[in-house]
Image (spheres, rainbow, N blue to C red):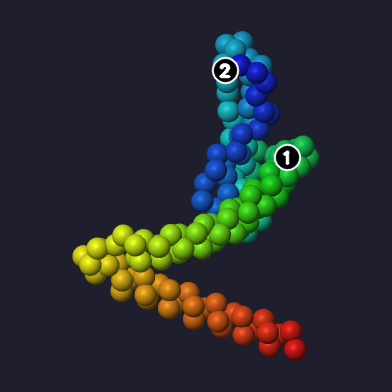
């Protein structure tokens, strides 16, 4: 590997990450990764690994990563929704212009139920927002 490596590495997992301190300053000139903490983004928890005590620098880097990660996940959520709108539009075009009867038989009920569910939730949420605005 070339270039400067970061001092910390975050192995992403579903609810957060395992945090490692990266060490390249050893006699073997190899990369050592020492796990120092486990992070749970949803709960906002930082748990030291084993008997380790985290330094102020460790905590600062981890908190910064958590904030950046939450921002990225939030961006991805809304991006996924915009993609879903695109998929609905391309699906409508496919249904109108290309789909065979057999293909429509295979997907119509599932699509109708999913769209009905989504419409119900959207209408309820919009009504809640309108009522809260009064």
Instruction: In this rendered view, identify the residue nearer to me: 24 or 103.
Output: 103
How many C-alpha atoms fall within 10 Å of the one at disc 2: few (<14), some, or many (≥20)? Answer: few
Nearest the camera: 54 or 79?
79
Give the residue pinned by disc 2. 1
Q: Secondary structure at mark 1?
A: helix
Mark closer to the chain start, 1 or 2: 2
Cα distance in 3D space between marks 1 and 2: 23 Å
| Residue under label 1 | 61
Residue 10 pos. (x, y %): 60, 38
The residue most toward the top is 27
Measured as percent of width and height from the top left, residue 94 is found at: 36, 61
Q: Position of residue 85 (x, y in %)?
A: 51, 63
Q: Residue at x 56, y 59 (%)?
A: 82
Mark 1 neighbour density, 10 Å: few (under 14) some (14–19) many (20 or more): few
Residue at the (24%, 63%) spot, across then down: 100
**Quadrant into which the N terminus falls:** top right
């Amino acid at each position: 590997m070339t270039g400067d490596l970061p001092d910390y590495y975050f192995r992403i997992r579903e609810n957060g990450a395992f945090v490692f301190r990266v060490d390249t300053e050893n006699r073997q000139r190899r990369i050592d990764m020492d796990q120092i903490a486990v992070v749970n983004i949803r709960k906002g928890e930082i748990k030291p690994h084993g008997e380790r005590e985290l330094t102020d620098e460790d905590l600062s880097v981890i908190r910064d990563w958590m904030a950046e990660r939450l921002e990225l996940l939030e961006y991805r959520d809304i991006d996924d929704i915009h993609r879903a709108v695109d998929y609905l539009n391309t699906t409508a075009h496919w249904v109108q212009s290309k789909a065979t009867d057999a293909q429509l038989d295979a997907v119509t009920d599932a699509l109708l139920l999913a769209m009905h569910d989504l419409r119900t939730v959207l209408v309820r949420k919009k009504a809640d927002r309108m009522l809260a605005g009064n």
